[in-house]
Image (spheres, rainbow, N blue to C red):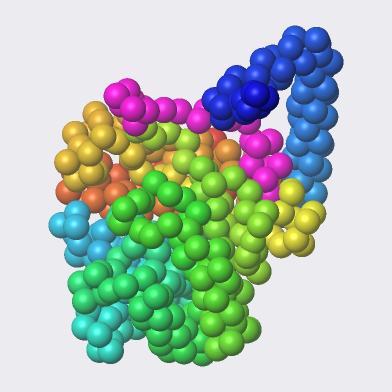
């Protein structure tokens, strides 16, 4: 009787394959290491070359200092948010990033409240300032996605339709406002640090949002941005301009390790390289839409001691971050933390950060003495 041919089990086949790969690697590891080293060296040369080219090309770009402002965050610090905003205008800022939080604008389905945002836009116009308006579901400040209560538990498809409806109402309202300079759509959309408050990045839906905004207003630039963590947005969609967020010292959590983490080892050439790639491939301009100028600590800012705040941000830290962006060839930048400077000045009688920003705004991104 002829014996049945035995077939190898799946696990046996995997073990055999791994052994074969191991033998192959052992025979060729020197060649593999040389190739890998060559690829790394070639990339480094290319990255440095692009970074140097970008810095040289943009070395004479004008210095433009803007600022982000959040009514909600200012209020959360116990501040008079209108006084906070007007103080920034009176300081001399001419470029603002303002928020149109979904839960504030549409607290009830189909019922819109633009009172506060209208006031901010009108005051900007009165002072001759321009506004980059943050739009969409994801907008700056924790928890990033500011969903109204009525939309939280909707099915994803219905949520997306409501986001589009909200988006269209906001764009249609401000497209002819004289203070409007640009839109910034879906803040740091590829940044996954805000899960579960924000849904997973959906590239297809982002393209739908871009098309919806452009269909209503094609005159104003549409900005998409990238965080420290999300690298270079090579796979699109790419905005008319691209904004970078740059944070230099943060409180990070790596498993059970919780500690302050500094990016001071990162050279300016890194962000010059990122910006250069986008300019070369997509012919878009790049700016720093969110430059760290406030603490990032183990708890919310309002619950930090002054010593904890100083661990990640000081007046000198603001100056250093401005110099970093400027040194990278990215001369247009929006500072992040205007509510904190005002809080420090009015609640703690410490105007160091406020005066440093005022000095930079008036004198430029160069070493200076704090005005007390």
Q: Verify whether residue 265 appears in magenta.
A: yes
In the displayed structure, would residue 314 be above or below residue 165?
above
Looking at the image, the residue that sits furthest to the front is 1
Question: Tag count in the figure?
Answer: 0
Give the quarter of the image for residue 326. Answer: top right
- Highlighted magenta segment, given as a residue range: 253-275
In the picture, measured across the screen, residue 34 lies left or right of residue 270, that is: right
> In front here: 347 or 54?
54
Q: In the rendering, at what x and y percent does residue 277 appear?
A: 74, 49
Q: In the rendering, at what x and y percent does residue 305 appear?
A: 19, 34
Give the quarter of the image for residue 27. Answer: top right
Image point 74% across, 48% down: which residue? Answer: 276
Of the 4 image quadrants, the one containing the N terminus is top right
Give the quarter of the image for residue 34. Answer: top right
In the displayed structure, would residue 102 be above or below residue 350?
below
In the picture, measured across the screen, residue 26 lies left or right of residue 76, that is: right
In the displayed structure, would residue 38 be above or below residue 219?
above
Image point 37% across, 28% down: which residue? Answer: 254
In the picture, measured across the screen, residue 178 lies left or right of residue 102, that is: right
> In front here: 361 or 19?
19
* Residue 177 visible in the displayed image: no
Image point 68% across, 36% down: which residue? Answer: 269
> In front here: 66 or 169?
169
Q: In the rendering, at what x and y percent does residue 182 appear?
A: 55, 74
* Residue 118 visible in the displayed image: yes
Q: In the rendering, at what x and y percent does residue 76 appear?
A: 19, 57
């Amino acid at each position: 009787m002829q014996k049945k041919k035995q077939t190898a089990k799946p696990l046996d086949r995997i073990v055999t394959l791994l052994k074969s790969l191991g033998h192959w690697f052992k025979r060729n590891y020197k060649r593999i290491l040389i190739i890998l080293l060559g690829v790394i060296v070639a990339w480094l040369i290319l990255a440095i070359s692009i970074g140097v080219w970008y810095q040289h090309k943009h070395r004479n770009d004008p210095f433009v200092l803007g600022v982000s402002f959040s009514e909600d965050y200012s209020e959360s610090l116990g501040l008079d948010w209108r006084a906070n905003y007007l103080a920034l205008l009176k300081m001399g800022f001419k470029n603002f990033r303002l928020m149109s939080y979904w839960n504030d604008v549409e607290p009830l389905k189909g019922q819109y409240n633009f009172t506060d945002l209208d006031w901010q836009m009108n005051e900007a116009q009165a002072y001759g300032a321009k506004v980059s308006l943050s739009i969409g579901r994801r907008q700056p400040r924790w928890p990033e996605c500011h969903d109204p209560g009525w939309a939280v538990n909707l099915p994803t498809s219905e949520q997306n339709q409501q986001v589009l409806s909200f988006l269209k109402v906001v764009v249609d309202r401000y497209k002819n406002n004289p203070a409007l300079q640009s839109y910034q759509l879906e803040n740091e959309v590829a940044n996954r640090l805000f899960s579960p408050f924000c849904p997973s990045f959906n590239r297809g839906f982002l393209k739908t949002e871009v098309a919806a905004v452009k269909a209503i207003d094609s005159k104003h630039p549409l900005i998409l941005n990238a965080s420290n963590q999300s690298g270079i947005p090579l796979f699109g969609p790419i905005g008319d301009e691209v904004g970078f967020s740059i944070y230099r010292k943060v409180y990070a959590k790596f498993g059970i390790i919780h500690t302050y983490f500094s990016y001071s080892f990162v050279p300016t050439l890194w962000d010059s390289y990122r910006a250069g790639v986008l300019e070369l491939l997509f012919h878009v301009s790049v700016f720093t839409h969110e430059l760290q100028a406030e603490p990032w600590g183990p708890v919310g800012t309002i619950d930090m001691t002054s010593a904890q705040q100083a661990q990640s941000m000081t007046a000198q830290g603001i100056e250093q971050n401005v110099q970093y962006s400027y040194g990278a060839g990215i001369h247009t930048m929006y500072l992040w933390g205007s509510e904190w400077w005002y809080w420090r000045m009015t609640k703690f009688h410490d105007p160091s950060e406020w005066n440093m920003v005022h000095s930079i705004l008036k004198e430029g991104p160069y070493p200076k003495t704090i005005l007390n």
